[in-house]
């Protein structure tokens, strides 16, 4: 049976509307931490101009591959194993990167590795969309995000909701600048970063 996350069913519509605009002229997307594959299947089907490459840590690749085999279309590749800490990333070239609900799960060193990998793949061009909860200047945007952060840290003290400013600083070092910070349902955001060295707009 396919593994399904309720949250993905709720958020895939609103995220798609963002990606439709932000990935309009992209050709190839690398998704980091694809999880159940619900996002990959939904976005690849709705955005047929994109070649979508899902990835996941090796230990969770099985259920993701199963979903891609069951529900994936021609523009959705079989998933690749990718741990963001394994630099350089062994992934195909892409002009866009998408990740959802990952930066608060990884420890901060892995978040910094994520942006090193992003720099390697995008080379200061293209576009990166990051969906999830974020703080601003250390402040939670809602009581439910504060509760979520406490729950995350009880489970893994290295995890936690990241500051938008700190993430934008890493993106800047990766040759990207924050071009949009979009409110999403359930106190989430989509942060959009674009390369400062030209390329896909
Ligand atoms: C909360 S799940 C989100 C999954 C999916 N993107 C979604 O929105 O439902 C967090 C994901 O981050 C991935 N992840 C955590 N640490 C990672 C790492 N070091 N490298 C790559 N992915 C990682 C997990 O494997 C998991 O798929």
Image: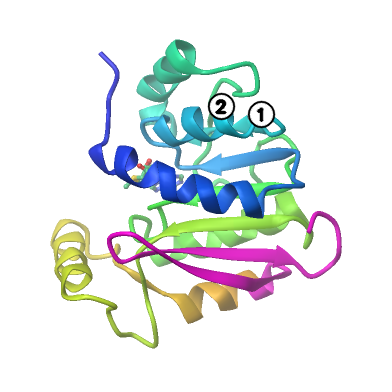
What's the distance in space between the residues labelled 1 and 2, CA to CA? 6 Å
Residue at the (86%, 63%) spot, across then down = 198
For label 2, count other residues whose C-alpha is less than 10 Å away and answer few (under 14), some (14-19) or many (20+): some
Foreground: 143 or 118?
A: 143
Residue 133 appears in view: yes
Residue at the (29%, 62%) spot, across then down = 159
Foreground: 169 or 194?
A: 194
Foreground: 30 or 6?
A: 6
Quadrant of image for the C terminus: bottom right
Residue at the (33%, 55%) spot, across then down = 105
Image coordinates of residue 148 in percent, x first then y, are 18, 64
- 65 with respect to 120 (left or right): left
- 150 with respect to 76 (left or right): left
What residue sits right under mark 2 in the picture? 45
Residue at the (61%, 46%) spot, across then down = 20
What residue sits right under mark 1 in the picture? 48
Residue 87 appears in view: no
Give the structural element (helix, strand or loop) at label 1. Answer: loop
Q: Residue furthest bottom?
A: 137
Q: Which residues are magenta?
A: 172-201
- 172 with respect to 104 (left or right): right
Image coordinates of residue 137 in percent, x first then y, are 39, 88
- The answer to whether residue 29 is above or below residue 79 is below
- The answer to whether residue 161 is above or below residue 127 is below
- The answer to whether residue 179 is above or below residue 95 is below
For label 1, count other residues whose C-alpha is less than 10 Å away and answer few (under 14), some (14-19) or many (20+): some
Tell which quarter ligand 1 is in: top left
Q: Residue furthest right?
A: 198
- The answer to whether residue 159 is above or below residue 23 is below
């Amino acid at each position: 049976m396919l593994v399904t996350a309720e949250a993905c069913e709720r958020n895939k519509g609103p995220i798609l509307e963002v990606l439709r605009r932000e990935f309009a002229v992209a050709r190839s997307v690398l998704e980091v931490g694809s999880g159940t594959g619900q996002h990959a299947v939904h976005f690849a089907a709705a955005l047929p101009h994109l070649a979508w490459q899902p990835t996941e840590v090796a230990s969770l690749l099985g259920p993701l591959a199963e979903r891609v085999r069951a529900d994936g279309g021609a523009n959705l590749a079989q998933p690749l194993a990718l741990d963001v800490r394994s630099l350089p990333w062994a992934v195909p070239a892409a002009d866009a990167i998408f990740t959802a609900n990952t930066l608060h799960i990884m420890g901060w060193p892995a978040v910094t590795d994520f942006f090193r990998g992003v720099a390697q793949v995008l080379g200061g061009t293209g576009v990166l969309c990051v969906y999830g909860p974020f703080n601003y200047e250390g402040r939670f945007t809602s009581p439910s995000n504060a509760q979520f952060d406490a729950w995350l840290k009880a489970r893994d003290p290295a995890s936690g909701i990241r500051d938008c400013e700190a993430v934008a600083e890493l993106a800047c070092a990766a040759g990207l600048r924050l071009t949009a910070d979009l409110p999403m349902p359930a106190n989430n955001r989509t942060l959009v970063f674009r390369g400062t060295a030209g390329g896909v707009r």
